[in-house]
Image (cartoon, helix red, strand yellow):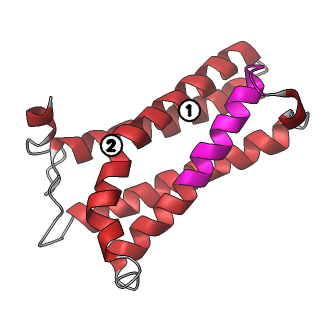
Amino acid sequence: MNEILHQPGFLGTSANFAADMTLALGLLVAVLLTLGVVMAVRQKYEVHRWLQTSAVVLNAILVIWMMILPFRDFVAPGLPQQLHERFYYVTVLHAVVGFSALTFGLFVMLRGNGLMIKPLRFNNYKLFMRISYTLYMLATLLGIWVYFTWFVNNPNPPVY
């Protein structure tokens, strides 16, 4: 599996397969979340719940498997000294927003599936879901910016 991930990517940039797959799966998460919003508007709440749950779980796996290690290996060693450089500030911004989206999204998903402990349950679903969706979309846009910063027109792209 490691050999496949380190092969050249399929998007025609300097990225490897792992980075291209991360971008593609991140976009898939955004599409699933958006379809879930459409289902909620159409009052198809069971389909909405399944789409949102699937997207949040897929995103959590993606973050744990494909994002934390590159951050640790390529970004964290340069902090805070190089935070003024685009490579670092774009990635750190994405990490902060992405962590917020992931944490809040997991919280909303657990509550929506009746798995949240009673003291942390909320009733204003629309507000919490809208905040979560907005954070996910912002994290997705920032993730695209990270991809372009790391792998498009970058003479020394990170290799992982």
Assess whether residue 153 is covered by the magenta stretch: no
Prevailing secondary structure of the magenta residues: helix
Q: In which quarter of the image is the N terminus?
A: top left
- Look at the numbered disc 1 and give the secondary structure of its residue: helix
Could you say where residue 59 lies in the image, as x and y percent from the top left? Answer: 48, 36
Q: Which residue is drawn at 69% across and 24% down?
A: 39
Report if residue 124 is visible in the image: yes
Assess whether residue 107 is covered by the magenta stretch: yes
Q: Which residue is disc 2 drawn over?
A: 66
Snapshot quadrant of residue 25: top left
The count of marks equals: 2
Residue type at mark 2 is: Met
Q: How far apart are marks 2 and 1 (CA)?
A: 15 Å
Q: Earlier in the sequence, mark 2 or mark 1?
A: 1
Q: Which residue is drawn at 45% across and 67% down?
A: 92
- Look at the numbered disc 2 and give the secondary structure of its residue: helix
Q: Is residue 27 left or right of residue 113?
A: left
Snapshot quadrant of residue 64: top left
Q: Can you name the residue that lies furthest to the top here?
A: 46
Could you say where residue 116 lies in the image, as x and y percent from the top left? Answer: 77, 27
Could you say where residue 14 lies in the image, as x and y percent from the top left? Answer: 13, 57
Against 142, is 37 above or below? above
Mark number for residue 56? 1
Q: Is residue 87 left or right of residue 9?
A: right
Q: Which residue is drawn at 75% across and 18% down?
A: 45
Residue type at mark 1 is: Val
Report if residue 10 is visible in the image: no
The answer to whether the residue labelled 2 contacts the one labelled 1, judged by CB atoms less than 8 Å apart, is no
Q: Nearer the viewer, residue 11 or 123?
A: 123
Against 138, is 109 above or below? above
Against 95, is 11 above or below? above
Task: Write the start and end of the magenta stretch as one range.
Answer: 99-116
